Amino acid sequence: MQYKKSEYRPDKIPQGPGVYIFRNQLKEVIYVGKAKSLRKRMANYFQAARSKTANPKLRSLIQTIAFYEFRQVKTEAESLILESKLIKEFTPRFNTLMRDDKRYPMLKIDLSENFPRLQLARVKKDDGCKYLGPFPETGALKATLDYLSRYFNLRTCSPREPDEEDYAHCHDDLIRHCSAPCMKRISKQDYQAKIKELISVIGGTTSALQSKLKEEMTKEAANMNFEKAAILRDVIHNLDSVFQVKNRNFTNTSHQNYPGEAGVVSLQKHLKMDKPPEHIECFDISNIMGTFTVASMVCFKGGKPSKKDYRHYRIQTVEGIDDFKSMQEVTMRRYMEKEGRPQLPDLILIDGGKGQLHKACDVIEFLGLDIPVISLAKREELIFIPGKIEPLRLERTDPGLRLAQCLRDEAHRFAISYNRDLRRNRLLDSLLDDIEGVGNIRKLAILKAFGSVRNLRRHNADELIRRVPGIGEKLAQQIMQFIKKEN
């Protein structure tokens, strides 16, 4: 969607999160920004008084804007990812001038090490390490990282295998911040257990740690140690602000506490179903940046995930961004399968509002199936039911709502991870276009033989020569050096 600056229409800009793009008269991208509310953020640039009171760099940007466009997404985390990708794609000059082209940090843990440590990273590489994030709260993240390393007695030294020589130059053990694996004062198994507990905390399971911290803070305050109490207060706040659910964007995140049968019984009651929905399937559409539109289907049985029944779908019949038609396609493909037709669910849950719900209901009716269909809308967590004018509003603590939220969030995570993998593979595969001597025919032959550049990286030049006819030793070495360098 695009307008001239003089035709700025705030009523046409959504309230939700997204990314906005400004272009000059030549339609060159000059600035990319993200927003929790697109309408509120973009209004700042088009207020008449703003261009007069803004600092010189911002004033110059405002005066240069000739066209604008926006891309709406579902969450703030998605807007962060999309903003970062667009800045890398267009390298807008005002992002550089205004120092707004930074990458938010992630936490990196190399689990292949015997005694892993927490590291900060700005770029996620295909190096086998576990990455958590990104985290917008940069300052709080660094302070929390330091505290967690000390709390779990993790090493902070850089050697992959620390030894006695490294110990001689280290002070962490003397002040009891480190468990000193270099001196064999902790076993590999015990250290790995600490890492597992740490990952659980970073994933959002902070209640036990926060309870302990609050006890210590109360104790310090009672003993008039207000400085220590203030430090503990800041740590508690940081744990909440950094690792709360809305800031998490992990590939391997999963809910730790599912409502189980309590959620199933609650949904049966609220939806007035004849039998409990033991088998629920939930659908979500993902189309970050308007490309690689995919759908996910996740399955819960007995109120818990049944991951062997999860499915991914590449949308095939829909051009551009159209969540309604995409939902129609994926539900049709799912339930009209002939060979090995899946066991039909007791309930279908759609991530979205009335539009997505109606499309799914049309498919179920067309196929002659008797399956209840509902949808869950994010903003107010309302459940829409076909034939009901008013949506169902459940208490936030209701196990039925929590079960629906778990399904929705898991479907969203599963769709996003698939979308991300497709885009990452597409980006890696395009590396072959930059290698001299590799044309379209050879590129297709390589991808047919190995599936993707990511998979090719796991092999050597000899294997490339063996699998792809017509590639000699010199070109094979050139290809392998290039794709392993571009990491």
Image (cartoon, grey):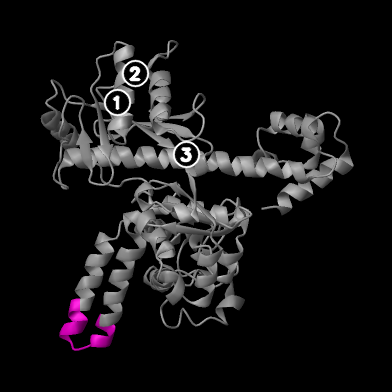
The image quarter in which residue 203 lies: bottom left
Can residue 260 be seen here? The reply is no
Q: Is residue 225 magenta?
A: yes
The residue wearing badge 2 is 363
Q: Label 2 vs label 1: CA separation?
A: 9 Å
In the image, 435: left or right of 26? right
Residue at horizontal 24%, vertical 22%? 346
How packed is label 3: few (under 14 Cα within 10 Å), some, or many (20 or more)?
A: many
Q: Is residue 412 magenta?
A: no
Decide whether the magenta segment is chiefly helix, strand or loop: helix
Give SS at disc 3: loop
Camera-side residue of 361 and 310: 361
**Which of the two labelled residues, at mark 3 and mark 1, occupies the earlier sequence position?**
3
**Which of the two labelled residues, at mark 3 and mark 2, occupies the earlier sequence position?**
3
Q: Which residues are magenta?
A: 218-229
The residue wearing badge 3 is 287
Q: Amino acid at mark 1?
A: His
- Give the residue furthest to the front: 6
Give x and y (percent) for residue 64. 56, 64
Q: Up-down: is 423 above or below 449?
A: below
Camera-side residue of 370 and 240: 370
The residue wearing badge 1 is 358
**Which of the two labelled residues, at mark 2 and mark 1, occupies the earlier sequence position?**
1
Q: Are marks 3 and 2 in contact (CB under 8 Å)?
A: no
Residue at horizontal 37%, vertical 17%? 335
Camera-side residue of 123 and 332: 332
Q: Which mark is residue 235?
A: none
Give SS at disc 1: helix
Q: Amino acid at mark 3?
A: Asn
Give x and y (percent) for residue 8. 43, 54
In the image, 229: left or right of 392? right
